[in-house]
Amino acid sequence: MLDLLFKTFADLKEPAILWRLFIPFVAAIILVSLLGYGIFGVFLVSDMVMQNPFVTEVTQWTNEAEQTIGSIPFVGAALLWVLGLVFAVIAGVLGVLLGSYLILLFAMLITAFMTDSLVKAVHDKHYPNVAYQGHGSLLGMTGKLLWFGFLLLLLFIVTIPMLFIPLVNLIWFWLLGFLFFRYSLVLDVGQVILPEALFNQVKDFGNWPPTLALGALFLLSTMPLVGLFIPVLAVIALAHYYFEILRGEQEAAAVMDSSPAQTQAEGVDS
C-alpha cells in the first residue's frame, strides 16, 4: 500500500500528470461548492425523509426519551445537553460525508474522461516497454457501474435503521461510499490496462495492496475540496499496480517462450 502511495505522489512532479490533477478542481469547484452540500441538505429535510414512517416513529421515540430524561432530578438537564451535543456532532459528520461524496462523484465523472491519458502518462514515464491493450467497452462498463450502484442503493435503503446507531452509522455510510469508489476505479483503470482474464484475477476486494491504497485516498476525500483531486491520484496508483502485474506476466511469458527454444538449441549442439 505505502509503495503505491509513494509512487503516486512522486508522479505529481510530472507536468503531464500535474496539470490533469487540477482539471476536476477547476471544472467542479463552482458547481459542487455552491450546490453540493445544499442538495443533500434539501434532501434531508424533504417530505420523502421527514414523512417517512420510520423517521416519524424515531422522532416520536426521541421526544418521549427527552421528556423521560429531562424529568430526572438534578442530572436530567445535563444528560439532555450531553446527548444533544453527541447527536449534533454525529449529524454534522454525516453531513460532511454526504457533501464530500457528491464532490467525489463529480470529480470521478470528470476524471473518467482522462483515464486513458493518465494511464498513458504513467506508462510512458515508468513502463515504456510494457505493452497494454485492455478489454471491454464504455457501454459495458457503464452498465456494470449502474447495476452495482443500484445494488448499493438497495442495500442503503434496507439498512437505513443503522443510520440511527451512533458510530455504526458513520462506519457503515463510509464503507458504502468506499465500495462504489473502489469498484468504479478498479473497473475503469483495469479495462484500460489489463486483458480480461488477468483483470478477473486481481479485481477482488481481497486484493489488499490496491484496496488499502484506495481506502487511504478515500479517507482523505472527506477533507474539504480534497475529494476533487482523489480520483486522479487513485487512477495513478492503480495504473502503477496494474502495470507492475502486467510486466510480471509478460516477463514470465517471455521466459516460458525462451525455454523451449533454448532446449531445442542445446539438443542440436549435442
Image (tube, rainbow, N blue to C red):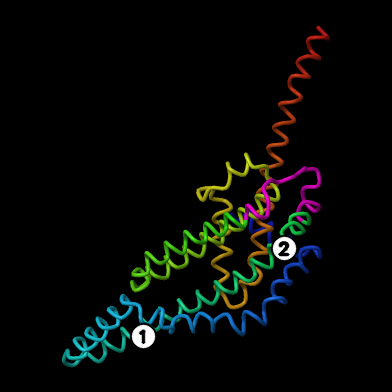
| Quadrant in which the C terminus is drawn | top right
Q: Nearer the viewer, residue 169 or 220?
A: 169
Q: Nearer the viewer, residue 6 or 240?
A: 240
Q: Position of residue 168 (x, y in %)?
A: 37, 68
Mark 2: amino acid: Phe
**Residue occupied by mark 2:** 113
Q: In which quarter of the view is residue 54 placed?
A: bottom left
Quadrant position of residue 82: bottom left
Crowd rating for badge 2 (residues with CA inside 10 Å; few <14, some 14–19, many 20+): few
Q: Nearer the viewer, mark 2 or mark 1?
A: 2
Residue at image mark 1: 85
The residues bearing labels 2 and 1 have C-alpha atoms spaced at a distance of 43 Å
Residue 9 coordinates in the image, percent (x, y):
69, 62
Is residue 225 rendered to the left or right of residue 46?
Answer: right
Residue 66: horizontal and vertical position, in percent? 24, 87
Residue at 70% over, 51% down: 192
Q: Which residues are magenta?
A: 122-141
> Residue 35's x, y, as percent?
59, 83
Membership of 125 in magenta stretch: yes
Mark 1: amino acid: Leu
> Above or below — where is 154 with respect to 100?
above
